[in-house]
Image (spheres, helix red, strand yellow):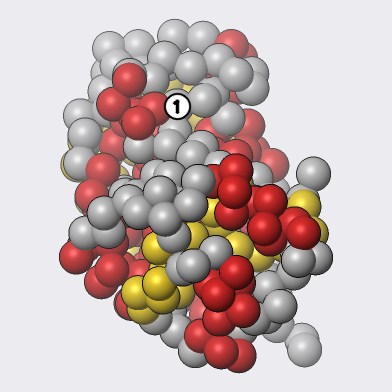
Amino acid sequence: MQFRHKIAGGDFSKAGNAASSVKKVLNQLNVDHSIAKRIVIALYEGEVNVVAHAYSGVVDVQIDEKQIKIIITDKGPGIADIEQAMKEGFSTASQQVREMGFGAGMGLANMQKNSDFMNISSVPGEGTVVELINNVRPYEG
Amino acid sequence: MTIQEISNLIEGKVLCCGDVPDVKIDYAFSSDLMSDVLTLQQEHMVLITGLANLQAIRTSEMSDISCVIFARDKKIGEDILSLAMENNITLIESPHSVFHISGELYKAGIKSIY
């Protein structure tokens, strides 16, 4: 199964729409609850990053019986120093983003914590691609 | 402790949604920083916040938080109510501060996460 969601930069009212859809799909597929929670938190953090920092983005989701692969691609300023951006507490977020309850420099680290594999590639001035992979298994009761 | 019992303790008004009397709460976390909330693993928890926006509800949805308490009579917009309803999240408005609500819940035996 695969699907795509668009993300509009700056539009906080829709941040989380993709994660919400993925959560519903994972519930329908009876994916283990704790695994689904990690996936949707990582994706939600990724969506907030696109809304907070980029002009636009897309989320591509591929799910099979063994894993879920999520690719978040944005057009935006990119990340000049990925290692620095991964450090907890480092943030370039605006005051508006902070007023939304984010921008504390915890997002990328939390995405890594909630994924089995994460890769970030970025071209400053063009945009960023974040790839997330999580192994999935059905709920066993 | 049930959501209804919690609401009574803090002079709360239950706005919506979900199966209020039956949901049991063990933990509470007070924060306006949703990034912090998204790092929590606990189940059966209530979020106490002064942040009355859609992201408080989205964060609760992703974190499986079934009840959000808004402190100091924050105005809850229709968009917030409708997203909470869609996700079966109970909202409580309280006239008290985050500090006061946290104290009442702690005194009543609701556990702290850290």
Q: Quadrant of residue B47?
A: bottom right
B98 or A101: nearer the eye?
Answer: B98
A117 or B6: nearer the eye?
Answer: B6
Q: In which quarter of the image is residue B79?
A: bottom left
Q: In which quarter of the image is the N terminus of chain B?
A: bottom right
- In the image, what residue occupies the spot 68% across and 61% down? B105
Give the residue number, with chain letter if any, for mark 1.
A103
- In the image, what residue occupies the spot 48% across and 17% down? A91
Q: Which amino acid does label 1 sit on?
A: Gly
Position in image of residue A17 (x %, y %): 31, 59
Position in image of residue B26 (x %, y %): 74, 69
Q: In this view, does B85 lie to the left or right of B94?
A: left
Q: Can residue A116 be seen in this view?
A: yes
Q: Is residue A106 above or below residue B32?
A: above
Asked which secondary structure carries label 1, the reply is: loop
Q: In this view, does B61 lie to the left or right of B9?
A: left
The number of discs equals 1
Q: Is residue A42 above or below residue A31?
A: above
- In the image, what residue occupies the spot 40% across and 49% down? B72
Q: Is residue A134 above or below residue A139?
A: above
Q: In this view, does B40 lie to the left or right of A20?
A: right
Q: Quadrant of the C terminus of chain B?
A: top right
Q: Can residue B3 be seen in this view?
A: no
- In the image, what residue occupies the spot 69% across and 42% down? A113
Position in image of residue A87 (x %, y %): 64, 18
Position in image of residue A75 (x %, y %): 25, 28
B37 or B108: nearer the eye?
Answer: B108
